[in-house]
Each structure stands twice: as structure tokens, then as C-alpha cells.
Amino acid sequence: MSTPDSPLSAGDFVEALRGLSHRYWGTHPFHRRLHDGSLSEFELRTWAANRWYYQSMLPQKDAAIISNCPVPRIRRDWLTRIVYHDGAAEGEGGRERWLRLCEAVGLTREEVLDERHVAPGVRFAVDAYVTFARTKPWVEAIASGLTEMFSGHLMRQRVADMLANYPWIRREDLAYFTNRIDAVSGEGQATADIVVEYCRTRAEQEKAIAALSFKCDVLWSMLDAVERAARKE
Ligand SMILES: O=C(O)c1cc(C(=O)O)c2c(n1)C(=O)C(=O)c1cc(C(=O)O)[nH]c1-2
């Protein structure tokens, strides 16, 4: 008989995780405006310079997961994420592609790298994500990254909408997203498989759901802070 303490089946567990999709930042008003073309150039620059902080901290978040994880197969997997963002050499990788997008919207590398535009709320939210990965059990940290299950569709839409609605943005400026779309679909599934494999008890499953919920709050708070910072001009 199923009780409140009995583990969810793998299917129900994944459904419960997917059920958080309405909390994902895809529906945030600022993202809606990014997609429908109504952002000013200043708002676009504010978005790109702030999201830089998220992009730049992802390798440290993934390194924290590796440092807490005793499973070689998973550490190996997470290493590829670090190399994906940092690149195999200087001037390559997701980090570099994000900087190119920043330049395309009119920012200099210098003003992105020195973080002068990063809003306090964005820094606070991103730092909370990194601290989560450093201090929580590795499987919860991995579960918090499951927002990637929701991001493939959003990124595909973003490329189409930005090309249609900001005529001065070229396809090559969006290489960060076009490159990321393929990576993300595979990674989202692989992450879900790991979370299902390692969260066996109901308590572990609930922690994973809470971790994904926390991450939705991180992303949502980032956009709240970006929206406010972009009002200043
Ligand atoms: O453009 C997006 O909407 C979006 C969302 C997310 C996400 O949902 O966390 C990530 C990314 N992009 C992304 O590019 C990326 O590298 C990434 C890594 C992670 C993570 O939590 O480890 N999320 C995301």
C-alpha cells in the first residue's frame, strides 16, 4: 500500500520534478519582454552584463559538486561541464561565447569582466546557488540543475525571437545559445537519470524536488533584480 512515506515511482518522481515548470523563469515578465522585442538597448545590455555573473560562476558551482561527489562516473561527467564553459583553451567555450554576445549588444569586455553592472540581487542569488552546491549533498546540488530540463525549448524560442525582433542582432552573435541548445537537451536527461538513481527514499526525493524549487527561485530572483536595475536609465 502506498503511504506518504513510500517512495514515488520513477515516473511519478520525474512528473513531480517536471511539475515545477510553471515556476521556471521562462514566464518571467522580463523574459517575455526579451522575447517579444520590447527591451531597449539599455535593458538588453543590463540583462547580458548581469547574466554574465551567472555564466561565470557555473564552473565554480560544478567544481563544488565534483568536490562533494564520491562517484567517479559522475565526477567525470561534471568535469565536461566545466570544460564546456571555461573552454579547452583560452578564448574558447561558453564563457567566451557569452562575452561575444555582450559585445554584440554594445558592452565592452572590460565593463563586463569588472562586474560594474552586476546588480546586488543578481550577485546574491547566484552566490546562493554556488553556496547551495558547496554545502548540500551532491545529489541535491545536481537536482537543482534540473532547470535545464525546461531550458532547451526556451533557448530555441529565444534564438528565433531575438533574430526576428532585434534586427541588429546576427545569428553568430547568439552562438552561446545555438551551441548550448544541443548540450542542454542531453544534459537535462542525464541529470534526471542520476537523480532518479540516487534518490530512492521518499525523503531523498522530496529534497530533490525542494532543490529544484530553490533553483527556480534563484533564476526568478535574478530576473527580478535585472528588471529593477534596467529601469534606472
Ligand atoms: O538560457 C537559459 O534560459 C538557461 C537556463 C539555464 C537554467 O535553466 O538553469 C541554464 C542555461 N541557460 C545555460 O546556458 C547553462 O549553461 C546552464 C547551466 C545550468 C546549471 O544549473 O548548471 N543552468 C543553465
Image: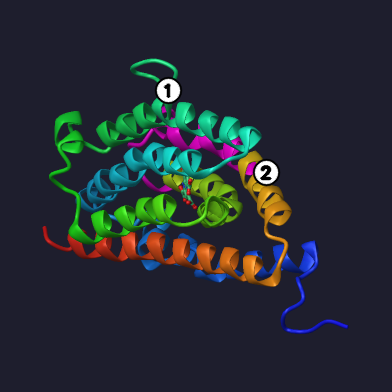
Image disc number at residue 199: none
Q: Residue at x 36, y 41 (%)?
A: 55
Which of the two discs, 2 and 1, labels the residue nearer the N terminus? 1
> Residue 23 in the image: x percent, y percent?
50, 70
Residue shown at the point (34%, 46%) measured from the top left: 54
Residue 220 x/y as whole percent? 39, 64
Is 172 included in the stretch rendered in magenta? Answer: yes
Q: Which residues are magenta?
A: 165-185
Mark 1 = which residue?
A: 87
Q: Is residue 93 left or right of residue 212?
A: left
Question: For the C terminus, which image quadrant?
Answer: bottom left
Nearest the viewer among 204 and 143 is: 204
From the Cβ of disc 1, is ligand 1 less than 8 Å away?
Answer: no
Q: Amino acid at mark 1?
A: Gly
Q: Is 143 positioned to the left or the right of 201 in the image?
A: left
On residue 190, the disc is 2
